[in-house]
């Protein structure tokens, strides 16, 4: 299962890495790709992960989550 997380507040490669690392730490997240231009992260899930958990990780890293959808 894949989900797209729309994120506000990333403005450089450092932000991208920061978000990537925050999401990769969640168990059940198998892969993460972040688009700086598109302002989103795509996560590949190997198990069940609540949207709230994804949101929390991004917000704790210092960015805003606008929305999460399955893709
Ligand atoms: Cu940055």
Image: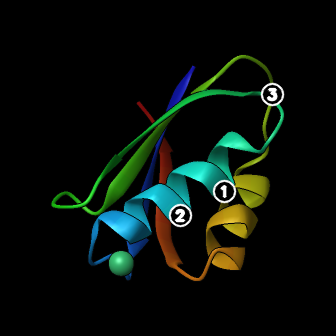
In the rendering, at what x and y percent does residue 29 appear?
69, 31
The answer to whether the residues at label 2 and label 1 have Cβ atoms under 8 Å apart is yes
Residue at image position (53%, 63%) is 18
Identify residue for label 1. Answer: 22
> Ligand 1 falls in which quarter?
bottom left
Residue 40 vs 61, above or below: the answer is above
Residue at image position (76%, 45%) is 25
Determine whether the residue tagged by mark 2 lies in a helix, strand or loop. helix
Q: How many numbered marks, from 0 up?
A: 3
Determine whether the residue tagged by mark 1 lies in a helix, strand or loop. helix
The answer to whether the residues at label 2 and label 3 have Cβ atoms under 8 Å apart is no
In the rendering, at what x and y percent does residue 64 appear?
51, 80
Residue 37: which numbered mark, if any?
none
Of the residues under marks 1 and 3, which one precedes in the sequence?
Answer: 1
Identify residue for label 2. Answer: 18
In the rendering, at what x and y percent does residue 10 appear?
35, 75
The answer to whether the residues at label 1 and label 3 have Cβ atoms under 8 Å apart is no
Residue 5 vs 12, above or below: the answer is above
Q: Quadrant of the C terminus?
A: top left
Identify residue for label 3. Answer: 48
Left-right relation of 44 to 14? right
Of the residues under marks 2 and 3, which one precedes in the sequence?
Answer: 2
Rate crowding at label 1 as few (under 14), some (14 to 19) or many (20 or more) other CA atoms within 10 Å: some
Determine whether the residue tagged by mark 3 lies in a helix, strand or loop. loop
């Amino acid at each position: 299962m894949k989900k797209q997380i729309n994120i506000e507040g990333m403005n450089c490669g450092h932000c991208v890495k920061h978000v990537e690392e925050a999401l990769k730490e969640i168990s059940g997240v198998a892969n993460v790709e972040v688009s700086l231009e598109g302002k989103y992260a795509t996560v590949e899930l190997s198990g069940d992960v609540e949207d709230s958990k994804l949101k929390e990780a991004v917000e704790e890293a210092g960015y805003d989550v606008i929305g999460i959808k399955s893709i």
